[in-house]
Image (cartoon, rainbow, N blue to C red):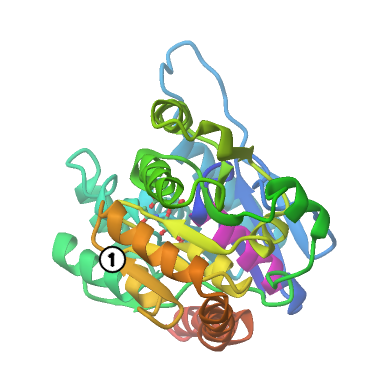
Amino acid sequence: MNIGITVFPTYGGSGIVGSELGRELADRGHNVHFISYELPTRLCQLDERMHFHEVEMFDYPLFEFQPYTLALTSKIIEVAETAKLDVMHMHYAIPHATAAFLAREIYKPTRYLPFVTTLHGTDITLVGAHKSFLPTTKFSMEQSDAVTSISDYLAAETKRTFGYDSVEVIPNFINAKQYYRRENKELRKQLAPNDEHLLMHVSNFRPVKRITDCVRVFALLKARCDTCVRLVMCGDGPEREKAESLARELGVVDDVIFAGSVPNIPDYLSVADVFLMPSETESFGLAALEAMACEVPVIASRVGGLPEVVREGETGYLAPLGDVRAMADYATRLFDDAHWRHTMGARARAVAIDEFTTDRIIPQYVQLYERVVTKKRNL
Ligand code: GMT
């Protein structure tokens, strides 16, 4: 099939999922065409099956805000024609589903180009539900040839907020051949020179990630054993300064490593002992799944779709939102009992592979594409 994919290229998990889905589809023999304003960050390699089409913007003094949705629409129509697209897959409803709807309607006299919309999170729970966007989000979902969400939680939220109940759940996925625990003595030595335990967090440091809770949990752990543990914060974003100054204030800054946006996430996860995700909300929590695949037990807040990813007491622990003491207690339990930590880590990988492996999830998308393409062909 010839599949068009649109994602937000620079920021967030939806771009990562859309990009990795493209790679997986190309590996299975499909031709994938990314249409966006920039090459998605996780796409380092384009090849004969992976193409990128840049949405060009036309700057005009009258446009204080450039109409990106319209430029995206026009680009989809152009690529539909040149690449003979069978289907478009839009990640994040706003404004992508709206652009795909416009493209489909404009292109209809030539050919019907169906589109699938995948909901990822704040496109439903925050941005798309804001009154500036709500009617447009709802309409664009209703007009989609199929709508998927990445968790049961998000499907329920879509029903609650928009009264839309035709969402199919296709969870996020992990490539077990890329995400696995590997030995990296050098990195381990660098991050834990005295063989301290490593508590790790990976995110884009947005307020929703509550990264200051990571620092608070860490300070509690340090108070219990000053030399036993270090905190590794991978990523970057708006809350970094706040977290740094809190670490300074709590006197733990020397043992917090702000590693920045590291390209080799599996290497970092492979040297971690415990992964911490204290998010305010998470419709899935892709970083938790990546940690699990690298045999790292996860401690997360019991919010959103996280209970669908982390199995309480089996692959990690779930704590009430903001309960840093409970999170520190769970971490202590895992640090103190290496056997239990390794058992839980092994179980985390087994669940990641069993439930979320690409071999299980990618065919679900392919079947969905085939269904919407066939349905429209038969109309
Ligand atoms: O919804 C967002 O805030 C944006 C979105 C993104 O682009 O980062 O994140 C969501 O999608 C990820 C990939 O499917 C999920 O793993 C995240 O849990 C989800 N974020 C939230 O729900 C806050």
State the residue at coordinates (57%, 66%).
290
The percent coordinates of residue 271 (x first, y second) are 68, 61
Q: Which part of the image, by quadrant, shows the C terminus?
A: bottom left
Q: Nearer the viewer, residue 270 or 14?
A: 270
Residue 190 vs 171, above or below: the answer is above
List the residue tagged with mark 1.
Answer: 302
Q: Nearer the viewer, residue 124 or 63?
A: 124
Q: Position of residue 375 (x, y in %)?
A: 45, 84
Q: Residue at x 39, y 26 (%)?
A: 249
Q: Residues within 10 Å of mark 1 (few under 14, many from 20)?
A: many
> Which segment is the magenta one?
14-25
Q: Residue at x 57, y 60 (%)?
A: 18
Secondary structure found at label 1:
loop
Taking the view exactly as shown, the residue that stands out farthest to the top is: 61
Please give left or right for residue 21 compared with residue 177 in the image: left
Q: In this orientation, does residue 72 appear?
A: yes
Residue 268 picture location, percent across and down: 68, 56
Figure disc tally = 1
Q: Where's the N terminus, which quadrant?
A: bottom right
Residue 238 sits above or below residue 360 on the image: above
Prevailing secondary structure class for the magenta stretch in the rendered image: helix
